[in-house]
Amino acid sequence: IDRQLTHRGAARSVTGMAAILAHEIKNPLSGIRGAAQLLEQGIAEGDRDLTRLICDETDRICLLVDRIEAFNEGRPAKREPVNIHQVLEHVKKIALAGFAKGLRFIESYDPSLPPVSGDRDQLIQVFLNLVKNAAEAAPSKGGEITLTTAYRHGVRMAVPGTRRRLRLPLEVTVRDNGEGVPPDLKPHLFEPFVTTKSSGTGLGLALVAKIVGDHGGMVECESEPRRTVFRVLLPVANE
Ligand code: ADP
Ligand code: MG
């Protein structure tokens, strides 16, 4: 018990430190951004590329810091019945209004799916991250994102790294027809700061894994060219 407590204490102070750092990084950043904007007004048109670059890059760091803060928020998760189909439809609406314009969504929902016990906002975050990655991976022509839900009777899943087996009968998948996850990335996919995107943060899937784990579930990925599936397995509300 002692060791566990120390461990938790250490984890808490590390996340506390990250939160303080995140906050302290934002102050000088907004100063840099403000100065770059002022400079932009006083210099020749041809040099504005550089001030633009400063603004864009400071925005990018700001975004990264926001994500670190969100990651460390540590807000206690709610435990209430959540309808996953409502969560998916909400995510789809956000996606179609913004980052997934022009992509085709295909749904295959199991209407008998029971509710999940969890935090609706956090589950929205999970599927928003998965759908965002799918949208970024899907081809701009003929891009498709498929959302499915299923109830798997009697399926027991081994918990990686333990000898436990859990009943996780709710299966929610997000599939895209993009080029797939690069094979060398596969073992590190859910680690923080792993990204192949020039303006990515690599925190999306780490957050997904954290929230799904907090809900007593699991997330896995299966990927080949033109077919990438992220499968989220969750326990049922009243079990
Ligand atoms: P980010 O999106 O900021 O790069 P993520 O943690 O969301 O961070 O994703 C990490 C990396 O995993 C991505 O940069 C990408 O290389 C890979 N990835 C995630 N989802 C997919 C997908 N649907 N298809 C192909 N690669 C993916
Ligand atoms: Mg992402």
Image (tube, rainbow, N blue to C red):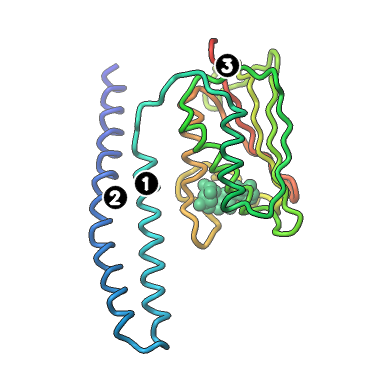
Q: What residue type is labelled 1?
A: Ile
Residue designated by label 3: 236
Secondary structure beneath dot 3 equals: loop
Mark 3 and mark 2: Cα distance apart in space: 36 Å
- Spot occupied by residue 202 in the image (x, y as percentages of width and height): 48, 50
Answer left or right for 52 relative to 235: left
**Front one among 129 and 163:** 129
Residue designated by label 2: 22
Label 1 near ligand 1 (CB < 8 Å): no
Residue designated by label 1: 68
- Spot occupied by residue 207 in the image (x, y as percentages of width and height): 47, 39
149 lies above or below 166 = below
**Quick check: can you spot residue 223?**
no
Secondary structure beneath dot 1 equals: helix
- Spot occupied by residue 141 in the image (x, y as percentages of width and height): 74, 59
Assign the C terminus to one quadrant of the image: top right
Dot 1 or dot 3, earlier in sequence: 1
Contact, CB < 8 Å: mark 3 with mark 2?
no
Answer left or right for 213 relative to 10: right
Judged from this view, the residue extending furthest toward the top is 239
Contact, CB < 8 Å: mark 2 with mark 1?
yes
Q: Residue 87 carries which label?
A: none
Secondary structure beneath dot 2 equals: helix
Kindly identify the residue that appears in the image at 30 percent across and 74 percent down: 36
Kindly identify the residue that appears in the image at 27 percent across and 62 percent down: 30
Contact, CB < 8 Å: mark 1 with mark 3?
no
**Front one among 47 and 188:** 47
